[in-house]
Image: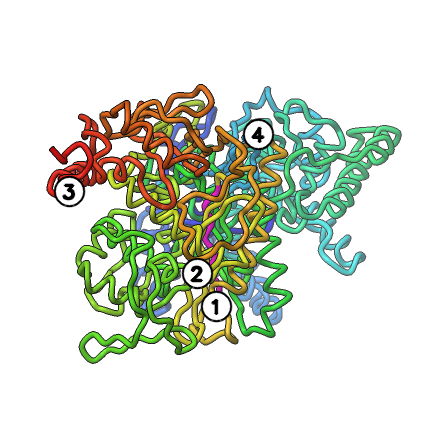
Amino acid sequence: MSERPPESGPDGRPRDWLDLGGAARPAAPQETTPKGGPPEGRFAEFSRAAAGFGARLGPTARAGFSRARASAGRLADHPAARRAAAATAAAWRPVASVARRVPWLRVTAATAALVIGLVLAYTIYALATLPVNGGLTVESTASALVVRAADGQAFATRGVIKGAKLAPKEVPPVLAKAIVAIEDRRFSEHHGIDLRGLLRAALRNAAAGGTREGGSTLTQQLVRMSYLSQDRTLKRKVQEAVLALWLESQLPKDEILTRYLNAAYFGAGVYGADAAAQRYFGKPAKELTLSEAAMLAGLVRAPSQLAPHRNLDGARGRAAQVLDAMVETGAITKAEADAAKRAPATVRVPTETPVGTNYFVDSVADSVRTLIGTGPADATVRTTLDLTLQNIAESVIARRLDQDGERRKVSQGALVAMAPDGAILAMVGGRDYADSQFNRVTQAKRQPGSLFKLFVYLTALREGYRPDSTLVDRPTQVGEWEPENYGGRYRGAVTVRTAFAHSINTVAVQLAEAVGMPAVIETARGLGVTSDLPNLPSLALGSAETTLLEMTRAYAAVAAGAESVEPYSVRQILAREQTLYTRPQTAPTPARDQAARTAMLDLLSAVVREGSGKNARVSVPAGGKTGTTQDSRDAWFIGFAGDLVVGVWLGNDDNSPMAGVTGGDLPALIWHDFVSQALAARAKAGKPEATRPAPGPRPETASVAEPEADPRSRDLASRDLAGRAVLRGSPAVVDTGTLDFDGRTVRLIGVDGLSGRNARELGRYLRRRDVACAPAGDGSAYRCSLDGQDLSELILFNGGGRASADATPDLLAAEEQARSNRIGIWRR
């Protein structure tokens, strides 16, 4: 008898893959008639006849003995019943005559009649309660989801894989002989029920001291799989036997065997012999070898325990028993069996879903449901997952928590890595998926702490603050709330850069009050934060709850110079050789506030270079931000390096405090370990990454938005996170709106340049100074920065040129300021 397959609903039927990982919803059954079977109406007619017969004769069994006499009375008045009673009385008269003379025979006859009557009544009851659905086979609409990584490798399967339905002529003889030998040796001889087989199985099981052979025929198993429930009750057994007899009278043997092979469960979410052959051996059923057919035939008894992707030794041992059975039945010779045992079947597909990827697969299933809805078709989805980076992420999180978790009282961690366009490259939603399927990347809402300062400072930079603007770190009060710095000390006058790099709370609160909390909330919304953000002063320090994915996408947008970045994990969905969805190949929209974004990158770089995130330093330019909440209940680090944006969170599910863990501590170390290994792996694979060494600590007065360049080098080219070429070096000046990097001409956005004395003065000003230029807008002009200042804005502010047609509002404002002050060309 086959075991009940896993991942089934309350009705015993498999759940749709779309329901896995979420609330269990049994898939609705769909009535179908298998290929080549009798018409729907034939079984419906049989079922209705049985039900009607039971309705007339079976109320005594269903309603109890209280209604038995009334029903019997009505039956007794029926002419057919009177004729049957008369015939029965005539037949029993000789026995009754003897029984009157022999008392014990009278008792025996009465007992036999009672037993026969009860058996007949129960059989009628079982027939009367058969479900009448109008068809022989009720197939589940549950479907399968095959998940492939970015490189096309299939690494996970969810739901039920049904595969192609075989026709009788397509069943390989070797598989038919194997399944008959091990499951039903007298299949060709019996008529649905094999009493001899039941006796043989009972004797062999008793001799073996356990269940080694089942007594159900293939026909009975087909009835059970296709129509009845898995209940082990007397009523279900009676129904099974009656339906098996009826089915044998309706279908030829080869059709019954074919239907059995198409419906049987072979483990790993696979139904049907063809699907099993594809899943385990990477080939259709018609190409199975003897050893492979023996392995498949051996699985149906205990598919979950013997499935070769989990228990190859057990599957091979069972296959050897099948080969022995085939020898006993004469299906093969002993020499053929021995040869097959010497060359056992080998699984040629990935063993099973890597445990750590299940968080990502759950997220993919949700995305597929959103993109194409639900449906019965098996689907294949190509995702963004980089399996190499995924393995690195899992090992880094596990190693750090194993090493420091108990000592630092931290039990959970999460990590997500994204490409500049939002493609999710790796996702670790928790320490152990088997222990908890809760995804801490997408589902856990926690306070971000100082991570939220990104939105405060970016809003301030938009409003005219600069990295070198000075504020005072002092005791601050907003209403009755008095925010404090970590460590309880104050620094006095500090630059915006220093305040952000060292995560000074009082300055962040002052800036939020200056620009207004509604503006800060608007900035957060624009960068993709959708969680509730209450308009409270404490929001400046991250008192609202958000997810790791929300915060990481916001930092990705800033790092990539984009208006916003939409995280995604699905590139393409295919079903039945049709493309159901393909993600459009569109780049994120460039941000309109490039000057503020450039300055923000300067602040983020300072965090890693000299601030609270120094533990995150890697061998390439990097930037990011730490976040720590009260009592160390949450610790974060989100940053960018090369072509990666990575977010890390540590904490406890019960929100209990950790032992002094801060964002610049364990999260920054995890970030460093992951990014270092990930960039090395991507470089080996030929994927882009930054190659310049990270700069060392710099004095507070040095304020450049880009990492320090070697002044002796010119035209140092790298790429930003959006993949755009970035020029660095000490350029020559063509005019005040045009620079030359060793023959490569760069036009400054927003500046209609001047030659002559103005160009010579700009040349002297830029001599031996490092300038970094990145494409702006459509790429025809560049945004250049010098010591943290936008060069176009600097030129216009000092009257070194006129604003051109592509000048942004901040550049127009700079020109207007020069006009008002009568500076440069505006003196006359």
Q: Which mark is residue 258?
A: 4
Compare marks 2 and 4 and give the one earlier in the sequence: 4
Snapshot quadrant of residue 209 = bottom right
Q: Is residue 279 above or below residue 311?
A: above
Could you say whether the residue bearing mark 4 is in a helix, strand or loop?
A: helix
Q: Nearest the camera: 694 or 827?
A: 827
**Residue that carries the numbered disc 1 in the rendered image:** 662
Real-space CA distance between mark 3 and mark 2, rounded to the nearest whole angstrom: 37 Å
CB contact under 8 Å: marks 1 and 2: yes
Q: Secondary structure at mark 2?
A: strand
Q: Is residue 815 left or right of residue 615?
A: left
Asked if residue 699 lies left or right of residue 784, the reply is right
CA separation in Å, label 4 and label 1: 63 Å
Q: Provide the residue designation for mark 2.
A: 626
Distance Cα–Cα, label 3 vs label 4: 86 Å
Q: Going 29% across and 39% down the picture, which residue do you hit? A: 594
Residue 121 visible in the current orientation: no
Q: Amino acid at mark 2?
A: Thr
Residue 103 in the magenta stretch? The answer is no
Residue segment shown in magenta: 644-652
What whole-number distance in Å separates the C-alpha atoms at marks 2 and 4? 62 Å
Circles 2 and 4, Cβ within 8 Å, touching? The answer is no
Q: Amino acid at mark 4?
A: Thr
